[in-house]
Amino acid sequence: MSKRTLRMEMNRVEGDLEIKLEVDDNTVTDAWCVGKMYRGFEQLLRGRAPNDALVIAPRICGICSTSQLHAATTALEVAYQVPVAPNGTRVRNLCLMAESVLSDARHTFLMFAPDFCHRAYRNNPLYDRAVALFEPPFRGSAARQAVQHSARILDIILAFGGQWPHSTYMLPGGVTCPLDRGRLQACREAIDSYAAWYEECVLGCGSERWLSLQTPDDFYRWLEEKESHANGALGVFARFGRSVGLHRTGSGVANLLSSGCYFDPEKWAPPFEGRPCLQQAGHYNGETGEVEPFSHLRVTEDVRYSWFVDPGGGRHPWQSDTVPDLRSGEAYSYTKASRYNDQVVQLGPLSDLVMAQDPLITSFFKAEGPNTWLRQFTRLHRPVLALGQMRRTVAELSCHLDEAAYVPSRPLADADGCAFVNASRGSLGHWVQIRGGKIANYQIITPTTWNGSPRDASGRRGHWEESFLGLEIKDLDDPVELCHVVRSHDACLVCTVHFLGLGQKQTFRCG
Amino acid sequence: MVHVICFGNPFHGDDGFGAHVFRRLAEPGGLPPGARLFEAGTSGLTALAFFAGCRKAVLVDALRGGGAVGEVRRLLPEEVGPPGPEFSVHNLGVAHLLAALPIAFEGRELPEVVIVAAEVEAIQPFTDRLGPPFQATLDRAILLVRQECAREATAENVAAG
C-alpha cells in the first residue's frame, strides 16, 4: 500500500484555504481542512457604534455582501425589538434572491462545469457538448451567457442599493431607498430577461414545465422528452455529472441544517420568535431521519483544533470570542468547529431546499443521499424557484407601493440580538451584544465556517473533511475528482488580493 | 470620457498599490477634467460596470510580471496572461475581468483599455503601507494615468474637429 499526502492550495496567492488529504492507493483515507487566514471582523466591530456593523459587515464578502448586510441589520433589529416595514422585508428578499440567482449561475457555469472540459474526460461521449457549453475561460456558450445575464440581474440590487457589492441600504426597521414604479419596472425587466435566458438555454423548457417535475423518474423522463432538454446546459450538466459518478461521491455528513430562507414580510415582526420564513427552517437529523425545529440557541463553537484562544468546550456565540492564538500542536485552522445540537452538519442550497420540502430535490435526497452531483444540481434548480418568488415579490411591492419601506426606531443602549438569514451558500448567523451603546461582542458564523470546520473537541471531522473520505483519485498529480467535490461545496473564500500575472499558470501543489 | 479604475487590497501591503494611486488621484486636482475615478478594490467581474459609459479605461493594479520590483509599466490587455483556473467566484481577478470584458460588451463598443501596473514581489498581509520602492513610484504611475487621460482628450478634440 502506498501512502501519500496531498495538499491542495485553494487560491493562488496566500492560500486562504488548504485541503490536506491522506491518500492510500489512490483512495482518500483522511482529510484536514485548513483555513489559513485570520480575518478578525468580529474583533474589528468591538467598541464601535452598532450601526457601524451595517457598513463593515457587507465588506466581509464581495459575493454575499447583501446577505452580510441583511444579517447585520437583522441582528440589530432583533436586539432593539423594533417593527420592520413589510415593504422593507420585501425589498431585502428581492435583493437577496437576485444575489442568489447571480451566484448560482456564476458558480455553476464559471466554476463547476468547466471541469467537465478536463482532458481526463476527452473520451466521454458528452465531452464535445460540454466543451461547447462550459469551456473556460468564458469560451463556452453557457459561460459567456452567464457573464452577460448575471450582470443584468444585478440591476435589481442597483435599483435599491445603488451599488453592489458592499452596499448599505438596510437599517433596523426596513430599507432606506425610495420605492417607485420606475424601480419596480427595472426589476421586472431584469427578472423577465433573466428568466427568458434561463428557460431557453439552461432548462430548455418553460419554468412551469420544469417545476412540474417531482421525482427522479420525472426528471429522467423529462431528459428524454426533447432534444432541448437533454442538450440544454442543465441537461448536459446532469448527464455528464452522472456519467462520471458524481452522484456517488462527496456525501459528507448526513445531518442537514437550514435556518430557512426569506422572512415572511407580514410575519417578520417583534418579538421575532420562531422562523417565519417563505422557505421552512429545520435540522435534519441523519441518524433518526427526523426533522427538528431550528433554534440558534443550539449552536456552539469549539476551538480545540482552531488557532483561537480556547476557553474549553463548545460555547454559544454569545459566550464566544474570536481571539487569534497561532499556537503549535493540534490546532490547524483559523476556522472554528461550529456544531448544531452537538452534531456536525452540512449547509447550503441542498440543505435549504430539503428543509423547504422541495419535491424534486427532496426526492433525489431520499433516493441517493447528499452528494456532489445533487449539491450542484440544486444550484441549477434553485434559480427557477427564486425567479418565480421574485416576480411575486415585485407584484406585492406594486400592490403596497403607497406604504413605507422603513419604520424609524430608537436604538437600545443594552441589548442582545441574533440574526440568521440565508446566503447563497447556506445559512448565515450574526450575534451582537450591545452594552452602553457600543458593540461589546460580535460573532459571525458563515456557511463556509460550518462546512469547512476543523475537528471538534470530540475529534469529529468537519463536513468537508468527511466528504473527501473514500474518494478515489485516478491521477494524484491532477486530481479532477477532488475538484468536483471541492467545488460542489462552493467554498466562500475571502476576497483577499487580486493582482495581475503575465502568462503565469496556477498549478496544484501536491507533495 | 476616461474611466480610471484602481484595483488592489489596501490592507495587503503592495497589493494595495492601485488603492494608493486612487487616494492620490481623489485629492482635489488629482484627476484631469474628462476623467472619472473608480476604486474597484478586490472586485473581479463586478467591476464590469465601471467600463460602461467611457471611450477609454485606464486600469491601475499591482503586477507580478518578472520585472524589477517597483517598476511601473504601461500594458495592453493582450500582454496580460490568460486567467488561470480558480476555485471560487470569490477569487476571480483582473485577468478574468479582462477576458470577460468583450463578452459583456458584445454588441456594444468596447472601450480602449490600458493598464498601468507596478511590479510587486511578495504580498505582506495586514498592513496598509506600501514598501519603500513603491512610495517612490506612485508619482510615476500617476503621471502615466494623466498622460493616458491627456491622450484621450486630444483624440476627442481631434474627433470633434
Image: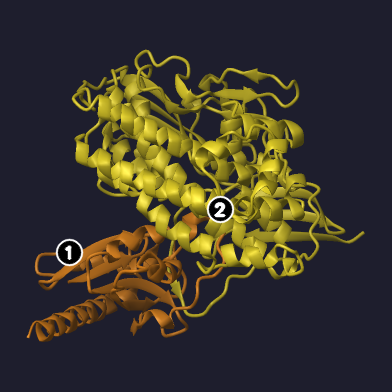
Chain colours: A yellow, B orange
Pick the residue in front: B109 or A221: A221
Q: List x then y, in percent, for residue B103.
A: 41, 67
Q: List x then y, in percent, for residue B143.
A: 20, 80
- In front: label 2 or label 1: 2
Quadrant in which the N terminus of chain A is drawn: bottom right
Instruction: Give the number of callouts.
Output: 2
* B130 lies above or below A448: below
Q: Are marks 2 and 1 on the same chain?
A: no
Q: Is residue A313 left or right of residue B148?
A: right
Given the image, on which type of amino acid does mark 2 rest?
Thr
Chain for mark 1? Answer: B
Q: Is residue A69 left or right of residue A10?
A: left
Q: CA distance from mark 2 to mark 1?
A: 38 Å
Q: Is residue A264 left or right of residue A30?
A: left
* A453 lies above or below A109: above
Q: List x then y, in percent, for residue A339.
A: 62, 30
Pick the residue in front: A487 or A51: A487
Residue at mark 2: A108
Badge 1: few (under 14), some or many (20 or more) residues near its Cα, within 10 Å? some
Q: Residue at x 71, y 66 (%)?
A: A510
Asked if the residues shown at circle 2 and circle 1 are in contact, with their CB atoms under 8 angstroms apart, the answer is: no
Chain for mark 2? Answer: A
Extreme residue in the right direction: A1
Quadrant in which the C terminus of chain A is drawn: bottom right
In the drawing, what numbered circle is on residue B26? 1
Q: Dot 1: what SS?
A: helix
Residue A303 visible in image: yes
Q: Dot 2: what SS?
A: helix
